[in-house]
Image: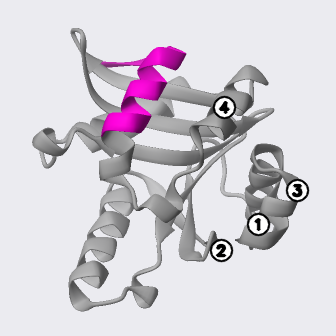
Amino acid sequence: MRLISLSKEEVKDIYNNRMVMDFPRDELKPLSIIYDALDKGEYACLGLTEGKDILGYTFLAKGGGDYLVDYLAVDSKRRNEGLGGCMLRLMREMLHEADSVILEVEDPDFAEDEEQRTLRRRRMAFYLRNGLEETGVTARCFGVPFIILEMGIRSRHSDARIRELYKEHYKRLLPEKMYKENIIA
């Protein structure tokens, strides 16, 4: 298996046919924002492939040597096969020279019910098992409360720096008004 850069057509297909199923609507950026960031070199869309099949994907906001994992999912029919862990390992290898890689995970303390709380705790445990570390930083993005994790590539950044990086990624991605109304870190 390997991670490859996705074409705009592959991104569009994943967005329209997978992301709408993998993520709540309120967490999906408009495809136009993703395309704009891709065109500016401020975004990367990667696919986990085996042969010609795309088994998973991750979309990353980037600025200089800093990355924010914006979306990460594996094919719903192939979950619990270790593909997510494989994708994180390949990302770590691919981004070995990055200054930072941060990721949002929904805060279990703000789940609507016990089923959601359990799912969020499982996601958090998955990321921690696969080498990400808690940062102590929380954020609210489009009304969704998140805990910010960091992929330990070089060294752990301070909470203040993580908060700053998080804001910088969204300032680059979003129109100013949308940023001001929807990002709290």
Q: CA distance from mark 2 to mark 4?
A: 21 Å
Residue 176, label in figure: 3
**Residue that lies at the very extreme toward the right in this rendered image:** 176
| Residue drawn 59% across the image and 45% down it | 30
Q: What percent of the width, then of the height, locates residue 128? A: 39, 62
**Part of the protein shown in magenta:** 1-17
Circle 1 SS class: helix
Residue on which disc 4 sits: 43
Circle 2 SS class: strand
Q: Determine whether, in the image, residue 69 is placed left or right of residue 107.
A: right
Mark nearer the N terminus (2 vs 3):
2
Mark nearer the N terminus (1 vs 2):
2
Amino acid type of the residue that numbered disc 3 sits on in the rendered structure: Glu
- Mark 3 nearby-residue class (10 Å; few <14, some 14–19, many ≥20): few
Mark nearer the N terminus (1 vs 4):
4
Amino acid type of the residue that numbered disc 1 sits on in the rendered structure: Arg
Mark nearer the N terminus (2 vs 4):
4
Residue on which disc 1 sits: 163
Amino acid type of the residue that numbered disc 2 sits on in the rendered structure: Ala
